[in-house]
Amino acid sequence: MRATVPTAAGAPPQGRRRRFRQWQHSHALREVLRRPDFRRLYGTRLTSQCADGVFQASLAGVVLFSPESAGDPAEIASAFAVLLLPYSLIGPFAGVLLDRWLRQRVLLWSNLLRCLLVGVVALEIATRVEGVPFYATALLVTSVNRFFLAAQSAAQPHVVEPERVF
């Protein structure tokens, strides 16, 4: 005979409760994914995150595996600064500025500006531009991205009801 854990009267056993909670979460996710505005925002976020990851990996590749710099410690420190500074310097102010601007315009213009700046970085890599101009442009890309991500996060409550966010 198997031992049972005492439960409240009428409550399903632990395994059933866990499956029920998982079902509730998956059901809520399906309901949210049915909304076209949420799917559009979510697709934009996934695309943006993937592009940001490719940019960061390519920046690391240029700095770490470039035969000219050969992994120079100053170059590596500059690359890390470019990737991390926007979180500390721009992140705290992005939300304040977003409250004053239209979020849709911030999403549109920051993405277009970021696309243009990534093209400039690619051109700098192709023409072997190094040093301050290269890192300044890369810093601008990651800084503009902070505004884009903050605007997406601020837009989420407008496409999902608060009780659906888990």
Image (cartoon, helix red, strand yellow):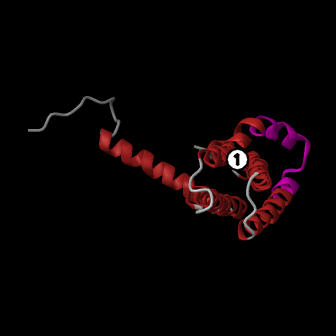
Magenta range is 90-107
Q: Main secondary structure of the magenta part?
A: helix
Give the farthest residue toward the front. 68
Q: Amino acid at mark 1?
A: Val
Give the farthest residue toward the left. 1
Q: Closest to the observer: 5 or 129? A: 129
Give residue 152's position: percent from left, percent from top: 74, 51
* Residue denoted by label 1: 82
Residue sitting at 62 percent across and 56 percent down?
Answer: 69
Quarter of the picture holding the N terminus:
top left
* Badge 1 element: helix
Give residue 45's position: percent from left, percent from top: 67, 58
Dot 1 alpha-carbon crowd within 10 angstroms: few under 14, some 14 to 19, many 20 or more: many
With 145 as the anchor, is 106 left or right in this view? Answer: right
Residue sitting at 43 percent across and 49 percent down?
Answer: 22
Q: Closest to the observer: 36 or 156? A: 156
Give residue 119's position: percent from left, percent from top: 77, 67
